[in-house]
């Protein structure tokens, strides 16, 4: 038998040859190194194509209502709120999002022993806010059946705030923290248009990841109605506080906090700061998208780390002179770890594809 | 013969929408097309549902014709922002997005027939089914796949090299 043609090799890869063809081709491969090599290549190519095509699939289909988030045992009686930070977004995203970011922290309670948090995250695509300097709040609103159950689970006070206005899609993500401190997140499976409503002066209600929210920021839902909704896999929401920061506000926040910031190394102004040195790493980026300073470091072996510094909007154990009140909170997601801590009015997040321990060591060195 | 639409839907809807999403880069449009396809299945129940459904869907796509080309591009642009899962880290989101765009670009380099064959095979179609859905002869499928796969990987790999340079 002469060499096997490409089409036949691929048919063999796809198990599409009939028995006699197949045995003839296999006999040939056994004696022909050239064809055996081409067969191996065809196998590899076919596999790679499957992987590549998979990259076109959406990460989380929105139509389907996802099963409830994985069981996240509570560590304490108080709800653990894990929210998004503005720093979730890249510079690119920020630019695309017309410099308006929307971040919401929402908590809900399921049954007695399990608290977890819902996080609304969104970067509005089209909703360009009228150049308002006033802080904005947004609350979820009703559009379709999925949203209906979502809204019916809201506390009445929140429901009352529902109204029209410019809207933006917010994807709902359930998040909880397990005993090990690992943050688990899962898209709840649908998105809601969020009306952007000017209101309330801005103490941004965004809570740092891993922090325990103060009562003002979380209200547990106890209404049976809300419980039912939770059990129906629709999230019961207690309070939806959404902060919309315009670039101006964030800049203002930076200057407000700049005074409190540790001089030099941790000051949020990219232009004037000394770089925070990481032994063995070189800094590849130092940028400021107010209020977040973002630094990226790369080790000689190519490990990339990212350090985000943001003025705190809430503080833990805030008391004058208590320099080292901050604790480290380590989370691991998809092989990526993040260490968060707070110091002197600033939130720090160091993230990278390192083991939590290694990352923690680096963070300790960085900690002012 | 009665056709159990519920069964048909459960069995093939996900796969069909995935294939159409990969093909169009637009999940919303993919779902519309799938919807229309299943509607036609009710009107004229097919005997061999899987190839039939996918063939109808691909025909609908073609019928939309050139007018849709502009729309598709625009939708892709809008849609691209959507694709970044909000809970991903910036790096991951960025990488993912880059890969996705490169894969789309590579797929776009294929002829329509090659692309369809590739996408159908990726949905688990055997060569007979691919032949039924595309009208190609069964004997041509292996050759078509060999060409499509090589070409796609080639274009994708070029994109990879180029983009690394561009990113520094």
Image (cartoon, rainbow, N blue to C red):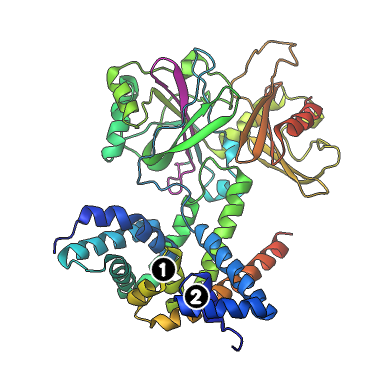
Up-down relation of residue A21 to residue A89 (above or below): below
Element marked by disc 2 = helix
Q: Is residue A166 magenta?
A: no
Q: Quadrant of residue A193?
A: top left
Q: Is residue A51 above or below residue A166?
A: below
Task: Tell me what residue is drawn at x 44 percent, y 32 percent.
Answer: A69
Residue assigned mark 2: A11
Residue under mark 2: which chain is it in? A
Check disc 1 and report the residue beneath it. B120
Question: In 3D space, how far apart are the residues under numbered discs 1 and 2 (Cα atoms)?
Answer: 14 Å
Residues shaded magenta = A103-130
* Chain that bears disc 1: B
**Screen quadrant of the C terminus of chain B:** bottom right
User: Magenta segment: does it hold A126?
Assistant: yes
State the image coordinates of residue A159 (x, y, percent, origin top left).
Answer: 31, 25
Q: Position of residue B3 (x, y in %)?
A: 18, 60
Residue shown at the point (48%, 70%) measured from the top left: A15
Residue drawn at (50%, 81%) of the image: B143
Residue A280 in the figure: left or right of residue A118: right
Residue count near mark 2 (Cα–Cα under 10 Å), binned few <14, some 14–19, many ≥20:
many
In the structure shown, which secondary structural element does the residue marked by tag 1 occupy?
helix
Residue shown at 52% from the left, 49% from the top: B84
């Amino acid at each position: 038998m002469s060499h096997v043609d490409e089409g036949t090799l691929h048919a063999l890869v796809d198990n599409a040859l009939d028995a006699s063809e197949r045995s003839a081709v296999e006999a040939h491969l056994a004696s022909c190194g050239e064809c055996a090599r081409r067969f191996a290549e065809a196998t590899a190519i076919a596999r790679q194509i499957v992987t590549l095509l998979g990259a076109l699939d959406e990460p989380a289909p929105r139509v389907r209502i996802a099963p409830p988030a994985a069981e996240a045992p509570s560590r304490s009686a108080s709800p653990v709120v894990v929210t998004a930070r503005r720093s979730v977004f890249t510079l690119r995203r920020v630019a695309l999002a017309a410099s308006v970011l929307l971040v919401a922290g929402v908590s809900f309670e399921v049954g007695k022993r399990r608290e977890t948090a819902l996080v609304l995250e969104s970067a509005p695509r089209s909703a360009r806010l009228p150049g308002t300097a006033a802080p904005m709040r947004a609350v979820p609103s009703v559009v379709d059946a999925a949203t209906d159950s979502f809204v019916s689970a809201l506390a009445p006070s929140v429901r009352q705030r529902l109204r029209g206005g410019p809207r933006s899609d917010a994807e709902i993500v359930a998040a909880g923290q397990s005993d090990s401190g690992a943050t688990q997140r899962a898209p709840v499976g649908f998105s809601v248009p969020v009306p952007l409503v000017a209101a309330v002066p801005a103490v941004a209600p965004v809570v740092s990841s891993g922090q325990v929210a103060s009562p003002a920021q979380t209200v547990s839902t106890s209404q049976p109605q809300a419980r039912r909704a939770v059990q129906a896999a629709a999230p019961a929401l207690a309070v939806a506080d959404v902060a919309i920061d315009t670039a101006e506000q964030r800049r203002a926040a930076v200057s407000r906090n700049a005074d409190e910031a540790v001089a030099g190394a941790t000051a949020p102004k990219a232009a004037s700061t000394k770089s925070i040195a990481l032994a063995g790493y070189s800094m590849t980026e130092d940028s400021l998208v107010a209020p977040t300073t973002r630094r990226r470091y790369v080790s000689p072996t190519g490990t990339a780390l990212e350090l985000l510094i943001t003025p705190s909007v809430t503080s833990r154990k805030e008391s004058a002179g208590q320099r080292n009140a901050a604790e480290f909170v380590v989370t691991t997601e998809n092989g990526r770890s993040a260490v968060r801590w707070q110091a002197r009015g600033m939130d720090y997040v160091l993230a990278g594809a390192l083991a939590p321990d290694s990352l923690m060591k680096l963070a300790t060195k960085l900690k002012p | 013969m009665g056709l159990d639409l519920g069964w048909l839907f459960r069995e093939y809807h996900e796969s069909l929408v995935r294939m159409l999403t990969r093909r169009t880069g637009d999940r919303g449009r993919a779902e519309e097309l799938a919807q229309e396809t299943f509607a036609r299945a009710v009107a004229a129940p097919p005997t061999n549902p899987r190839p039939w459904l996918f063939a109808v869907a691909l025909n609908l796509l073609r019928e939309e014709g050139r007018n849709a080309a502009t729309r598709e591009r625009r939708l892709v642009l809008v849609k691209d922002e959507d694709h970044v899962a909000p809970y991903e880290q910036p790096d991951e989101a960025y990488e993912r997005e880059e890969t996705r765009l490169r894969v789309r670009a590579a797929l776009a380099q294929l002829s329509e027939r090659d692309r369809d064959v590739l996408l159908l095979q990726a949905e688990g179609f055997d060569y007979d089914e691919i032949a039924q859905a595309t009208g190609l002869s069964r004997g041509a499928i292996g050759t078509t796949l060999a060409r499509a796969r090589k070409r796609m990987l080639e274009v994708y790999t070029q994109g990879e090299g180029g983009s690394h340079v561009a990113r520094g």
